[in-house]
């Protein structure tokens, strides 16, 4: 039986606290910032990467030793304090009392959530987890998947998002949309994008949409491809 229930957590505009000042803390802070969190990093001193992140406005650095009140107001806490077992235990216990999300890096028994190794291609997210038993192995499995999901998938997923928007607007049922994406998936569209033949990939998508009674022009779909991702959802 699995020990965890996989979810996608929305941290956009949420306050997040990273406790630690080393490169691991910098990596955790960068990942939270990339997902839209408002990140504070707390420690007595910080690596140069974290100083650079503060200069660019990515994080706020808080220079102080830990105390229980430091957790107040934060949605999620990540601590790289496994080299200080007493500190790690204090953070865990304080977070539990506050009903907060707490991850003590490399210490699964002191986490109420764990962070998988993540591969992103635009809106496509592939997560690999060993439930905290072997993060190093999870990372290597994710690296192997990078060849299977090349960077082209970002444009491929964007095109799929655009097609779904038009299908829904045209009133196609769930089953019809599912059939469309079965054909989209088995088509040559991904290969065309990989070969940098973007125009033919768009033309193939247009032809497929027309079979489902959706008629859009090349200029329209080119304009859609240039829109911010948030405008397509």
Image (cartoon, rainbow, N blue to C red):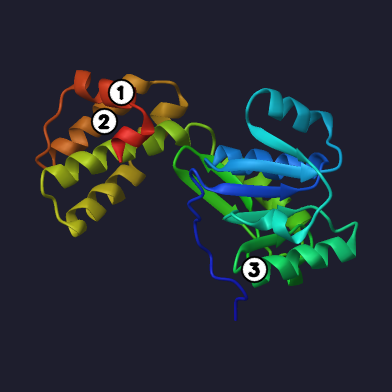
Lower sequence index among marks 1 and 3: 3
Q: Quadrant location of residue 41?
A: top right
Looking at the picture, how far across and down is residue 37, in whole percent? 55, 43
Separation (CA) of disc 1 from disc 2: 6 Å
Looking at the picture, how far across and down is residue 199, in whole percent? 31, 20
115, above or below 214, in the image: below
Marking on residue 204: 2
Report whether residue 131 is seen: no
Which element is circle 1 on?
helix
Separation (CA) of disc 1 from disc 3: 47 Å
Q: Toward the viewer: 53 or 15?
A: 15
Which element is circle 2 on?
helix
Q: Is residue 126 left or right of residue 211?
A: right
Q: Is disc 1 in contact with disc 2, using a CB cutoff of under 8 Å? A: yes
Q: Quadrant location of residue 84?
A: bottom right
Quadrant where the image shows the C terminus: top left
Looking at the picture, how far across and down is residue 165, in whole percent? 23, 41
Q: Is residue 108 left or right of residue 173?
A: right
Camera-near label (3 vs 2) is: 3
Q: In this view, does 204 lie to the left or right of 110?
A: left
Separation (CA) of disc 3 from disc 2: 46 Å
Name which residue lies at 25% across and 33% down. 205
Q: Toward the viewer: 125 or 56?
A: 56
Residue at the far front in the pictured view:
69
Marking on residue 112: 3
Marking on residue 86: none
Judging by the rendered image, the residue that carries numbered circle 1 is 200
Name which residue lies at 41% across and 31% down. 155
Lower sequence index among marks 3 and 2: 3
Q: Quadrant location of residue 192?
A: top left
Q: Is residue 226 left or right of residue 150?
A: left
Within 10 Å of disc 3 (Cα), the crowding (few <14, some 14-19, many 20+) is some
């Amino acid at each position: 039986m699995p020990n965890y229930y996989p979810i996608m957590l929305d941290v956009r505009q949420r306050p997040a606290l990273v406790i630690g000042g080393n490169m691991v803390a910098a990596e955790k802070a960068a990942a939270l910032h990339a997902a839209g969190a408002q990140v504070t990093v707390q420690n007595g001193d910080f690596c140069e990467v974290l100083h650079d992140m503060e200069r660019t406005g990515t994080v706020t650095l808080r220079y102080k030793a830990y105390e229980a009140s430091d957790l107040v107001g934060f949605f999620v806490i990540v601590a790289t304090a496994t080299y200080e077992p007493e500190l790690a235990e204090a953070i865990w216990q304080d977070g539990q009392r506050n009903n907060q999300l707490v991850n003590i890096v490399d210490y699964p028994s002191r986490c109420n959530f764990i962070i998988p190794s993540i591969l992103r291609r635009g809106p496509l997210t592939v997560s690999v987890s060993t439930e905290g038993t072997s993060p190093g192995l999870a990372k290597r499995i994710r690296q192997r998947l990078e060849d299977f999901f090349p960077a082209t998938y970002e444009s491929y997923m964007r095109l799929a998002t655009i097609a779904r928007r038009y299908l829904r607007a045209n009133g196609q049922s769930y089953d019809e949309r599912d059939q469309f994406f079965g054909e989209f998936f088995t088509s040559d569209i991904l290969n065309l994008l990989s070969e940098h033949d973007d125009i033919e990939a768009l033309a193939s998508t247009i032809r497929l949409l027309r079979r489902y009674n959706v008629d859009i022009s090349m200029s329209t779909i080119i304009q859609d491809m240039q829109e911010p991702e948030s405008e397509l959802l």
